[in-house]
Amino acid sequence: MTVQSAGEAPPLPQAQRLVAILSDHRVLVSIAALALLPWLLPSKALAVNVLIYGVVVMGYNLLFGYTGLLSFGHAAFFGTGAYLTGIVIGRWGLPWFAAVPLAIAASTVLAAVIGTISTRTRGIYFSMVTLALAQLVYYVALQASSFTGGENGLRGFTVDHINLFGVQINFLDPLNKYYVLMSLAALAIWVQSRILNSPFGAVIEAIRENEQRARACGYDVERCKLIVFMLSGAISAVGGCMSALHLSIVPLDILHYQTSGMIVMMVLLGGARSFFGPFIGAATFLILEDVVSVWTPHWQIVVGAIFVVFVLFLPKGIWGTFLDALPAARERR
Amino acid sequence: MDLSLIIMQLFSGIALGAVLVITALGLTIVFGMLGVVNFAHGALFMIGAYAGLYLASLTGSFWWGLLLAPVLVGAFGMLIEFVLVRRLYGRSIDDPLLLTFGLSYILVEGVRIVFGSDGIPFPTPSQLIGVVDLGVGFFPKYRLFVIALVAVVLLALWLMLEKTRIGLIVRAGARDPQIMRVLGVDIGKVWLAIFGLGVGLAALGGVLAGPMRSVNPEMGTLVLAEAFVVTVIGGLGSIVGAVVAGLMVGICISMVALFAPEMATIVMFALMAAVLLVRPQGLFGLKGRA
């Protein structure tokens, strides 16, 4: 006799079971996938870029995908994280493990300032104000050239080996470097998952769905927006730290509005509102750039066109569209 | 410091502000009527400058470029509305913004393919080379012309919106498109025309700015940020706001350039932050919009 005990879930079709496993173990799955990345992609350089941008876009997705705030100025936090890592290592002579927390803390303070001004506004206004304030950060970095190297970017700091609790790791070896940077990414992924699983994570999604109702439920919407803005800036700054450690230079372009735009494109290509979307988006964008730039220097026109097609026909991105194809998976993202 | 120098700098600020006003006006009209923020506005400004340059060299006269570029680029804008933006009405408010953002990539790269990545000099028309004696000092003729032309365009726009039947339909359509539809107005056509008008104003701004700035594919980026700052300060959707804020920002930039040149690009953002802290909806914005 086959009697199913009460409370036991009926067996799921295979595809849905896969999605259930992915979403229940999203931190482990993400880390495992990233660990395999250098072996799956054609070059280690591409893998490390997917890693870095994946973290930046993930932090951005906390704000855009989960809270529904379309910022156009996230390059400010990505760039500040990178610049401060470089400045602390190069100018102050401190080791990398002191530079990273300092850079993240400073970026969070910057996010608090920009967030205070921009979250006073709503809707499209918010996008315009974040873009304008990020441009302000760009021009400050351009003008304060004695600190930032101005147009030439920040140079003169090198990370060739890393002291990891007494173990010397050769940073010139791409694989060693990849896995050290991946440990930072893993930390960011875990933090992001914890935020989303917390009651606060539910509140920001409530704000996205209906701001007025969230307010009526008694949540301090303005304060939640500011906090999520700061958390999002801090996680994106982790990507900035990784970028500075990876390149040993910080180009001024990292603060440019095009970088903010790239972050927005990546999240939309992969699929906002989902945990894996940002990594899939970053990988798609960077692989696309890699492939298209082989046969035309004008790869941006192709990427722009693909982006327009996504906005028109696949607004949920690659991962979001995939999840929608599995009806029972919809609630489990 | 010399008083006449300050007055001359004030005039420069007004000329700079006049271009900002025209550009921001295009952005704000489209938002006010359609609820769409056109992220490709800066790129279309840039295309306006290139179109003006190209048409001027084709016809041998700056004036043809000035006249035709806004019309042709405006028509191109209508094509964009008809083919792309129109599909997104009624969807999330972010979608048209994202669409036009992607479009700006295509437009900028398209111009790079046709005209190359390097800047091109935009010669001042021969009739407007030189300076005028204003009594307190000498001022470039071209900048005086920009101020006068923008004043005329503003007056024409104001008359059209306030005194004509078309303006009445447009204003009513912004308030309540549903009622206009019930009254038998084809609001789709109105939106098409408004989008074209907004893009045409961006192109006009581009042609006017040509002889004052360098013409290159990236010129739209700074302009987009400037136009955003102006519309945010003035209040999104407010025409009076765009005019006041545009002049304010222009004068502010050129005054600061006189005393602390390295702060000139930064000051407008500081101004915007200050205004937002006091009035999140902008100087002339409506409360519900912000």
Image (cartoon, coloured by chain):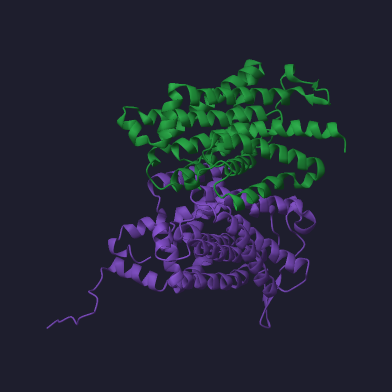
Query: B256 and B109: which one is in front?
Result: B256
Chain shaded green? B
| Total tally of numbered discs in the picture | 0
Identity of the residue drawn at 75% across and 59% down: A155
Chain shaded purple? A
Q: Residue A221: give x, y in percent of width and height.
A: 48, 62
In the rendered image, the vertical position of residue B31 relative to residue A36, given as above or below:
above
Q: Is any part of residue A217 visible from this angle?
A: yes
Identity of the residue drawn at 48% across and 50% down: A123
Q: Within the image, what quadrant is residue A208 found in?
A: bottom left
Identity of the residue drawn at 68% across and 45% down: B268
Q: Is any part of residue B111 visible from this angle?
A: no
Residue, far right: B1
Q: Within the image, what quadrant is residue A81 found in?
A: bottom right
Relative horizontal placement of residue B200, taking residue B118 as reference (left or right) = left
Relative horizontal placement of residue A63, taking residue A146 as reference (left or right) = left
Q: Residue B7: give x, y in percent of width and height.
A: 80, 32
Query: A183 and B30: which one is in front?
Result: B30
Query: A123 and B103: which one is in front?
Result: A123
In the rendered image, the vertical position of residue B20 relative to residue A307, given as above or below:
above
Q: Residue A330: give x, y in percent of width and height.
A: 32, 62
